[in-house]
Amino acid sequence: MAVTRPVRFVFRKLNTGSTVMRAHQLCQIARRFARGAYDFDLSEFPHERDPDSLGAWVGDLPEGCILFFTKHAVKMLDGNLREMLSARGCRVVIDCVDSVIDRLPFAHADLVVSSTYDGYRAMIRAVDDGLIDAAHRDKMALVLHAADIKVYGLGRAQSDSFSTAYLGAPENFLLPEALDGAVAYLKATNPRLMRKSLKVLGNYSFHYGVRPTAGLEARIRSYKPFTKGVTAAHCGAPILINRDVDDATIFLSDSYPFFVDDGSDGDISRAFAHARDAFGGPEWRYAQSIMQSVAARTSPPEITRQLCDALDMV
């Protein structure tokens, strides 16, 4: 009989979206859709980093388990902790979300997971360019970022008219003055506000995802998950989004009709007007079909398959 390997999502007790979505919710998704090869659970990293606290935490871990270090927990990983984990037979996976790739502790990891296509490709390029040791080439995998788990139960957008919402943080909301009042702002800066906003998100037929894009030309940088596009897809809604944000053209293709190209006020306003005029027509339905493909690529069973494929590497 095959042995079920224990997997623990390691998180720090922080009220952040990344902790909720890549620890608690990913664990919940994996428990439901994995086929028994792994035993998924959560493990909170100790608040204190003194030897006694770390020793007690490591001692409570199942021997030989796989540890999936999420964003903020990755910052706690160093050589001393890795030695303690190795002594207990643990394997270490680090989750690269919003992290500058060449600053990740590759030396302490058995596998580095990217939540974006562009980020995964950038890690491979960094190896080719000599920025990351070639020994790590076979220690990289892709596990795409899911939508907030509550989005999967919303169903398709119910509005029969053109209506637009932005779901997210204010610093990522790039809206020209000419569109003031045309886009509802749904706050999502913490889990409580996210829950409140998700209750009304299904009322909108179009999502707004235009953001500032400064710094995207850098060779070595962090890579943002395509969560706004994934969220829109699982709501059955097209999205207005920058062409050059991470993963946009990979998910949507170059032929997607509702891209913003240069991010100027005029460009954004023109693209928004184009989407409004296309509502309900052939171009709109084509955009909806593309969003359906995004939803299929980021469904909970598909995310679980990617996760299990990655864990199989360790």
Image (spheres, rainbow, N blue to C red):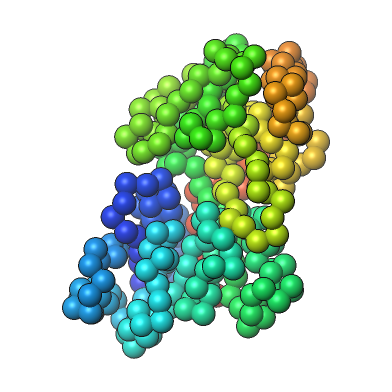
239 over 64 or under it: above or below: above
Can see residue 8? yes
Q: Quadrant of residue 27?
A: bottom left
Q: Please name the residue shown 65% across and 48% down the image.
A: 215
Choose between 194 and 106: the one closer to the eye.
106
Asked if residue 140 lies left or right of residue 12, the reply is: right
235 over 243 or under it: above or below: above
Q: Please name the residue shown 28% across and 55% down the image.
A: 13
Q: Quadrant of residue 191?
A: top left
**Where is residue 268 drawn, in percent x and y?**
70, 24
Asked if residue 94 lies left or right of residue 245, the reply is: left
Q: Quadrant of residue 11?
A: bottom left
**Where is residue 284 drawn, in percent x and y?**
72, 22
**Where is residue 124 drawn, in percent x and y?**
69, 68
Can see residue 314? no
Choose between 97 and 285: the one closer to the eye.
97
Q: Quadrant of the N terminus?
A: bottom left
Asked if residue 72 lies left or right of residue 266, the reply is: left
Q: Please name the residue shown 73% across and 38% down the image.
A: 243
Q: Please name the residue shown 43% across and 69% down the image.
A: 37
Residue farthest toward the bottom in the current orientation of the protein: 87
**Where is residue 286 drawn, in percent x and y?**
75, 28
